[in-house]
Amino acid sequence: MGKISVLLLEDNAGDAYLVKEQLKDIEGFDCKIDEAQYLKTAIELLQNNSYEAVLLDLMLPDSKGIETFFAINQQAPNTAIVVISALTEEALAIQAVQEGAQDYLAKGQMQPNTLYKTIQYAIERKSVTQQLIERTRELEAFNYTVSHDLKNPLNFIKGMSSLLLSKKRSQPLDEQDKICLERIHNSSLRMEQITKNLLDLSLAERSPISIEEVNLSEVALEVANNLRQQQPERQVKFAIAPDIIAQADRQLIKLVLENLLGNAWKYTQNIAEPIIEFCLSSQISPAAYCIKDNGIGFTMSEADRLFIPFERLSNSRGFEGTGIGLATVKRIITRHQGEIWFDAQPDQGAIFKFTLNSD
């Protein structure tokens, strides 16, 4: 590793001196250290300089706790951050790592070699993370482009096959020709659904978020009515609690309810008296929004696959689907700084709960 630039953000002069002396004692470690005692000063330094790493004390005169990390990470998203914390602040340091810091060290327990290796690994880890983020962005852009460009030829295939199947003719189609056309048409409908789901997945990740007050009960009712119109022969009871309000992106949260209520609709189709509920659970804070059904459920041992794109559970094979819907839901909830979890048993239905920290 060549010469690196490090920003040391520490308001305690004794602790700052100790860190600098330890870095000087590391053989073969060539670094330039800038210091700041205040968050405001650190932000100014980050605006005017480039650093490979930031050594960050979370408790400063003008900023306390995890907000200190958020401010530094927002200003320097491509810079490795190592939190240096007192033993009594270890929980905060762990939270910072969970939120994106590369590592943390406890004051009073640092040794020169440990400090050196931690900085080195943090820089390498940040570099790998940035490469993965960039590759993910490239794949998402490719996904969007391919999905979008497939729409026109798919619409043409669907339209022409439908026309040929419905066209009046003096002689009826040969039975084999009719079967082939029906397969073409059904396959185009299947591809159209996959394309729509891929575009939704891209939308969940790429579209800007505009937070506003949304009546989720009204959105859920709209989704329920659309499902009924698609299959008017089904008698499904919807129990939608009134006036459930959330702060969310209207377009994205509608996608969440379309996928969750759509899954409940799909997996109750063989149930004698299907019931789908949408309600608010105030037993936890923040309150959780719940979608519950009495459908086929699933085995919790398979639950780790639930939010992976294109993965489908073993008992869903007899139902149409692309395996993209719940991955889309997960990304939207994450972008709203919320969480989603579930509980289910085979043949006893499923319940999905999610929070929106944008509340």
Image (cartoon, rainbow, N blue to C red):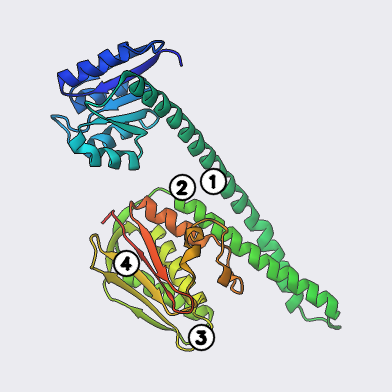
- The alpha-carbon separation of the residues under discs 2 and 4 comes to 24 Å
Mark linked to residue 140: 1
Along the polypeptide, which appears first: circle 1 or circle 2?
Answer: 1
Residue under numbered circle 2: 206
Cα separation between marks 3 and 1: 37 Å
Please tell me how crowded label 3 is: few (under 14), some (14-19), or many (20+) other residues with Cα within 10 Å: few
Residue type highlighted by circle 4: Tyr
Residue 163 placed where, x, y %? 73, 73
Sequence-wise, the earlier of marks 4 and 3 is: 3
Instruction: Give the residue type at disc 2.
Output: Arg
In three-dimensional space, the C-alpha distance between marks 1 and 4, rounded to whole angstroms, equals 28 Å
Q: CA distance from mark 1 to mark 2?
A: 8 Å
Q: Work out whether residue 29 or residue 281 is closer to the camera in this orientation and state it.
A: 29
Q: Residues within 10 Å of mark 4 (few under 14, many from 20)?
A: some
Q: Secondary structure at mark 3?
A: loop
Count of numbered marks: 4
| Closer to the camera in the image, 195 or 355 | 355
Q: Does the CB distance between marks 1 and 2 fall below 8 Å?
A: yes
Query: Nearer the N terminus, badge 2 or badge 4?
Result: 2
Residue denoted by label 3: 234
Q: Position of residue 81 (x, y in %)?
A: 34, 30
Amino acid on which disc 1 is placed: Glu
SS under mark 2: helix
Quarter occupied by residue 283:
bottom left
Residue beneath disc 4 = 289
Where is residue 164? Give x, y as percent. Answer: 76, 73
